[in-house]
């Protein structure tokens, strides 16, 4: 609700002084003359924010993008009314949020969703109600293995496999210990895919699953050591990942193993929290292109956040993904017949028909299709912690492994592979 | 004699558990897990001792110790980010936790003095949620690390590098046990605390200055909570929620000491850490690691009840 009000406020401000604001601020496509008017197009979004984590940056970025669209003339001249709900990591609240948006507010689609909980709870609900979710922060298997959810982010599985590929191909790893969360459909799912990838390469891997609230990260580190691995892949939320690497630092293990991580450690505050010990030794997979990228959309994302977001909105991977989902959604609706954009069934069919949308924020084409699983973003970038920041060590590369084979078949059918 | 028998039974049980869980593992691996478990167990013991010190004097099982400690270490971390010298930030962090503990003990504690122990404990749970809410409001979820100079120096014990920070925790736990034992046994205030713990009504009748004695206890508890928060922030991780809920295994350690005996709290905490660590070696039992402290505490409770000793509500007997 707060985000909706913010978007409306921003749009209202632009309405009041269009000449001044439009002259100084970034423009978002489709970019008609003057601010949007008329009946709003209702769109929803659900994020999770409560201890132990805040996943709101995706919906914040989507909100900023829609505010920009509204200020730039809207979609077919109409503004987007973006209603955002917080599931607070509570399954009951997640179900209530979806029902409120889909049934009470009648949204035509959901955009920018980011949560551990929401997708697991609501995936079948979205399918039953024929509404599509263009998510941005998927982390659980149900989010990717659902007919009505498609995300611009990769999630822990693809990102971990990407990190494992780099460890094998560039760092010479032959036996990887994947450190994941002991949460069903998260740690076992993503580290299991790493094991499958390694097995397909004729190499070895094992999973070490940690309780999210465990005070003792040493035992998991020792378990990884006992596995006989020569490479350790940290597939944990940033706070826990920092603690794990701190324990490894205490044991002076930096040079004993090669170290990779999935995306959660690709955050501007991580190098500072890690300290100089890990300089040049920790390689992190980035689900989207680098945060300081110079592509057209990368620069536009930062400009939109500067002009339409709050100064304290994170500029992180989820923010990129939220921006991108909102951008693709806007791109789609602007190509639809104006008479159909309030028809949920028509919007759902149109989203399912998306093929080959491109952006410099992701390495491959974005598509949806009618399928029981979606993971369009499965190519990424590898960066290394360096001098208090990150440097790119491998540009866009496509991930391999048994898990992706059905997806590759689907891409071939769509003429994308 | 009975103590010797109990100690012997305990040593045999621990040896059996360690041998059973580590059967077939190389001795160097077992040694590393053992030392790792002792390091974590010392954290449980530290938290448990802070609880027992206050409970003995006031009858309050303070669930807010973790939240207060979390706020203290977050303030210390923030001051370091602003460029304040480390030692000063530690003192100020502990000073804040002491002030919070004293504030609760003087303003809210007396109003609950004659209520059931459970009511007193639940009141501190409310205080914990208020403090945790304030901390979450002040610091958004982000990646942080609270470093100490002692992190950079380590010695190797049974193949595992142990930082001086961890050794400080072990030394502090033993030191606190000894100092509190001496304080309770050899000072007038300590005698008055023991009198309060034994019978609050009778103590009041014979002229023990209850408010003053309890204030001292709340102050000591606040100092220990502050120190514990700094150690948890460094050795566990700098996340207020995680530090706040470290109170739960700490309570399990305190129960091992019957909320009374500091030496048993130390032994209980270390034992829980070692067993929890050793469970990692068992593929079948690895998944039950998080509940190990509570299973151990439950077994200790059953053992105590077999001897017809009540734990909570001791002051109402």
Image (spheres, rainbow, N blue to C red):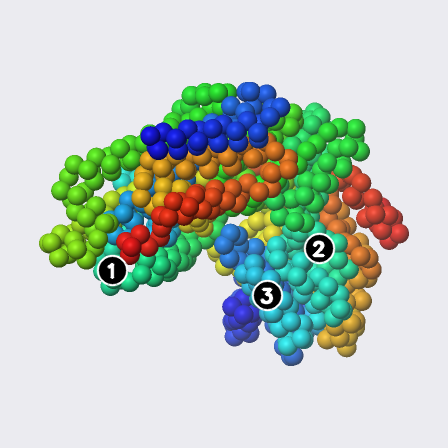
Residue ID for mark 1: B113
Q: Is residue B44 left or right of residue B114?
A: right
Label 1 neighbourhood size at 10 Å, few (<14), some (14-19), many (20+)?
some
Q: Chain of mark 1?
A: B
Instruction: Answer yes or no: are tags 1 and 2 on the same subunit.
Output: no
Looking at the picture, how far across and down is residue A145, in whole percent? 75, 54
Work out how far the residue at label 3 is from the one at label 2, CA to CA, in angstroms.
Answer: 17 Å
Residue A333 in view of the camera: no
**Residue B190 quadrant:** top left
Q: Name above or below for residue A78 compared with residue A282.
A: below
Instruction: Answer yes or no: are tags 1 and 3 on the same subunit.
Output: no
| Residue at image location 45% in from the left, 34% down from the top | B271
Q: Which residue sits furthest bottom?
A: A38
Q: Chain of mark 3?
A: A
Disc 2 element: helix
Work out how far the residue at label 1 is from the one at label 2, CA to CA, in angstroms.
Answer: 51 Å
Q: Is residue B180 left or right of residue A186?
A: left
Disc 3 element: helix
Q: Name above or below for residue B305 compared with residue A231.
A: below
Label 2 neighbourhood size at 10 Å, few (<14), some (14-19), many (20+)?
many
Looking at the picture, how far across and down is residue A410, in whole percent? 85, 51
Q: Which mark is residue A92?
A: 3
| Residue at image location 25% in from the left, 62% down from the top | B114
Residue ID for mark 2: A142
| Residue at image location 45% in from the left, 21% down from the top | B157
- For the residues bearing labels 1 and 2, Cβ distance under 8 angstroms: no
Mark 3 vs 2, N-terminal side: 3
* Between marks 1 and 3 in the image, the one whose residue lies nearer the viewer: 1
């Amino acid at each position: 609700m707060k985000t909706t009000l913010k978007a409306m406020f921003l749009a209202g401000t632009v309405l009041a002084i269009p000449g001044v604001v439009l002259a100084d601020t970034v423009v978002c496509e489709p970019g008609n003359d003057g601010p949007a008017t008329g009946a709003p197009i209702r769109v929803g979004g659900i994020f999770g924010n409560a201890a132990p984590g805040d996943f709101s940056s995706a919906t914040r970025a989507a909100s900023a993008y829609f505010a920009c669209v509204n200020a730039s003339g809207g979609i077919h001249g109409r503004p987007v009314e973006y209603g955002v709900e917080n599931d607070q990591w509570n399954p009951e609240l997640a179900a209530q949020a979806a029902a409120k948006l889909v049934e009470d507010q009648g949204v035509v689609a959901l955009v920018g969703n980011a949560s551990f909980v929401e997708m697991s709870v609501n995936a079948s609900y979205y399918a039953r109600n024929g509404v599509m979710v263009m998510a941005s922060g998927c982390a659980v298997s149900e989010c990717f293995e659902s007919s009505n959810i498609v995300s611009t982010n990769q999630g822990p599985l693809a990102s971990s496999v990407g990190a494992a590929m780099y460890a094998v191909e560039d760092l010479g790893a032959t036996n990887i210990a994947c450190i994941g969360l002991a949460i069903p459909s998260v740690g076992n799912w993503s580290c299991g895919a790493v094991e499958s990838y390694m097995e397909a390469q004729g190499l070895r891997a094992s999973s070490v699953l940690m309780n999210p609230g465990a005070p003792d990260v040493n035992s998991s580190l020792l378990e990884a050591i006992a596995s006989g691995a020569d490479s350790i892949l940290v597939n944990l939320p940033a706070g826990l990942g920092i603690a794990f690497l701190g324990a490894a630092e205490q044991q002076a293990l930096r040079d004993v193993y090669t170290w990779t991580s999935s995306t959660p450690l690709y955050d501007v505050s991580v190098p500072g929290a890690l300290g100089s010990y890990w300089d040049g030794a920790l390689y992190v997979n980035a689900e989207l292109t680098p945060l300081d990228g110079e592509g057209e959309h990368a620069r536009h994302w930062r400009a939109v956040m500067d002009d339409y977001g709050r100064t304290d909105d994170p500029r992180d991977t989820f923010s990129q993904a939220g921006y991108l989902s909102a951008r693709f959604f806007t791109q789609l609706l602007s190509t639809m017949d104006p008479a159909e954009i309030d028809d949920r069934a028509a919007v759902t069919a149109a989203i399912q028909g998306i093929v080959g949308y491109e952006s410099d924020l992701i390495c491959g084409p974005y598509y949806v299709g009618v399928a029981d699983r979606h993971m369009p973003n499965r190519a990424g970038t590898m960066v290394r912690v360096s001098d208090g920041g990150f440097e790119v060590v491998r540009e866009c590369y496509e991930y391999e492994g048994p898990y992706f084979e059905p997806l590759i078949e689907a891409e071939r059918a769509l003429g994308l592979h | 004699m009975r103590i010797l028998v109990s100690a012997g039974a305990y040593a045999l049980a621990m040896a059996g558990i360690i041998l059973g869980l580590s059967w077939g593992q190389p001795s160097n691996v077992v040694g590393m897990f053992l030392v790792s478990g002792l390091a974590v167990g010392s954290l449980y013991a530290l938290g448990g001792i802070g609880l027992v010190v206050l409970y003995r004097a006031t009858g309050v099982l303070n669930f807010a110790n973790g939240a207060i400690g979390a706020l203290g270490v977050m303030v210390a971390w923030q001051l370091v980010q602003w460029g304040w010298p480390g030692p000063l930030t530690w003192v100020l962090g502990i000073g804040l936790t002491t002030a919070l503990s004293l504030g609760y003990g003087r303003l809210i504690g007396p109003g609950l003095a004659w209520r059931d122990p459970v009511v007193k404990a639940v009141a501190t749970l409310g205080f914990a949620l208020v403090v945790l809410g304030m901390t979450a409001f002040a610091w958004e979820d982000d990646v942080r690390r609270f470093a100490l100079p002692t992190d950079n120096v380590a010695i190797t014990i049974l193949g595992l590098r142990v930082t001086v920070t961890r050794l400080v925790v072990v030394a502090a736990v033993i030191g606190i046990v000894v100092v509190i034992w001496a304080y309770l046994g050899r000072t007038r205030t300590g005698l008055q605390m023991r009198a309060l713990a034994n019978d609050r009504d009778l103590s009041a009748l014979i002229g023990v200055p209850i408010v003053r004695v309890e204030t001292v206890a709340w102050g000591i508890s606040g100092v220990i909570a502050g120190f514990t928060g700094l150690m948890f922030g460094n050795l566990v991780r700098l996340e207020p929620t995680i530090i706040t809920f470290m109170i739960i295994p700490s309570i399990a350690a305190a129960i091992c000491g019957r909320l009374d005996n500091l030496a048993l709290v130390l032994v209980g905490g270390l034992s829980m850490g070692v067993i929890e660590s050793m469970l990692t070696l068992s593929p079948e039992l690895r998944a039950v690691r998080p509940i190990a402290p509570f299973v151990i505490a439950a077994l200790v409770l059953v053992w105590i009840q077999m001897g017809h000793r009540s734990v909570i509500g001791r002051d109402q007997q």
